[in-house]
Image: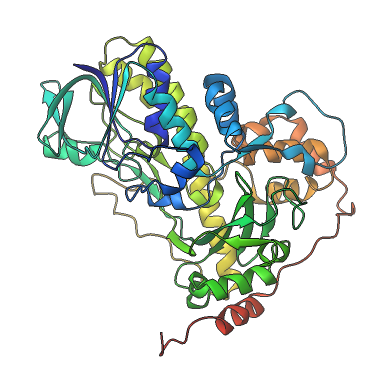
Amino acid sequence: MASTVIAGGGTAGLALALALGARGHRVRVLERGGPPPQGPLVKSAGLWERPGVPQAGHDHILNALGVRTLRTRAPAVLEAALAEGARLADLTAAAPPGPAEPGDEDLVTLLVRRSVLDLVLHRAASALPCVTVSHRTAVTGVLTAPGPRVTGVVTDGGERIPARLVVDASGRRSASRSWLAAAGVPAAADLTGPSRLHAFGRFYRLRDPYGPPPGPLNRANAAGGVWDHYSAVLHPADNEVFAVTFGALPGDRAMAALRTPAAFTAACRLSPYLAPWVDERAAHPLGPVRAIAMPPNILRGAGPGRQRPVAGLLRAGDAACVTDPMFGRGLSLALAHAFRLADLIGEHPVADERLGLAAAELADRLLRPWYEQGVLDSRSRAERWRAAAGEPPVPEPVRPAPAQPAPVPPDPVPPVPGPLLAAALAAAATDRAVWRGITRIGASLATPREVFADPGFPARVRAAAPDAPVPAAPRPPSYAALRRAIAAHAPDRKGG
């Protein structure tokens, strides 16, 4: 009998298996996708077909929260990733002048592709004697007992696997909702907030692995920017690979043509800091342009009518919380959540309701603040881009009348007033202390509420000279100029 069954072999599922297996727990991971190929890790990662994880083909960021999690919880995984070509980027390289302070050593990100990191995790977890990873095996339902309590799973092959604990690590679809519904167990409603954003990305490899970078990284671990009408950001990864990702509004026909390689390249050549990187003499593309609609922000089981947890069942990673991928928090949150869940499982030898309540409390502490920030960030960026494009704001959703039993909860209230946050972002360009606070927020090491709760921080923001010189920087093309450049290289609508 498997002590713990984990449904899903993505980042969260593998990290949880690694954390539990290292403590001697018997774990079986059930993954519906095929196994990775054998052979050299980086080559195998590139050949690993994962149709159930389509986002693995897009750019990912392991921010400072994720790096700190690996450093403290799985240093061998971090060392293995670095040995396979990943690199640590020091964010303080982009800080204004000023003295270093304790904690600055945490301000780093890991430059690595999602597929490489997942394969490092896969091999580390699979090497543990008490961890088994079963591929091409999907969980289709759960075994239950009165209480209600989950006592195991049923697979698509008809296997009935009893378990002390079942963990849903199936990703954004959170398959446990359908399992519970089929078993007649009610589930609490989710909190959701739309992202309203689309992305177009492409990977490249530098031609000269020993030469200097084609251009500067103006954002310490990235090049490009988030502008008033779109975003165009380049992130280096492992082994001379880098990714360029454009963010745009959904429904924008002109920007939708970015999926065409020629239009994508034309936009890169217009975007500040990106042109030298995509020069054919500097790099070559590794694949097609991939488009993705950003999924909504979701906090599972935390909506109106919230019920007590179902004993014997937990959710991990994206199955517990989804944040807008445009802001680069999901991968690190999945790692942090998985290792902290392992702590709770170790503290509760019986997988009863107390473990479920502890997991719900963990979600409130760790995940809820970033879910709420994701909702605010998605809405703010979409509103800014719509205004720049001359589009009307998206109307607020119609909320149920008070007489209905499950009213929609109000949108999160910004923890920091907009003008104060804007002033802090401006002051961060010249004040190192303000930069440190803003960077810790971006790196998921501290929430905006935590940073601005220090009375000295907003005071320092307000004291920043409004006329302090800000370093000159290239500006992006106008929205009209960008659309014209993309349209000039888009395929003819009539001819295809």
Residue 409 position (above or below residue 70): below
Question: In this view of the protein, which residue sits in the foreground, 399 or 464?
Answer: 464
**Left or right: where does residue 310 sit relative to residue 210?**
left
Q: Residue at x 74, y 36 (%)?
A: 436
Q: Residue at x 32, y 42 (%)?
A: 190
Residue at the extreme bottom:
494
Q: Is residue 265 left or right of residue 123?
A: right
The percent coordinates of residue 336 (x first, y second) are: 49, 28
Q: Nearer the viewer, residue 137 or 404?
A: 137
Residue 182: x and y in percent read: 12, 39
Residue 433 showing in the rendered view: yes
Q: Quadrant of the N terminus?
A: top left
Q: Is residue 382 above or below residue 212?
A: below
Dividing the picture into quadrants, the one containing residue 234 is bottom right
Above or below, 213 against 335 in this view is below
Which image quarter holds the C terminus?
bottom left
**x, y percentage for residue 320?**
37, 36
Q: Position of residue 490 (x, y in %)?
A: 52, 81
Q: Number of numbered discs present?
A: 0
Query: Is 400 displayed left or right of 241 in the figure?
Result: left
Q: Is residue 133 left or right of residue 204?
A: left
* Most foreground residue, 138 or 392: 138
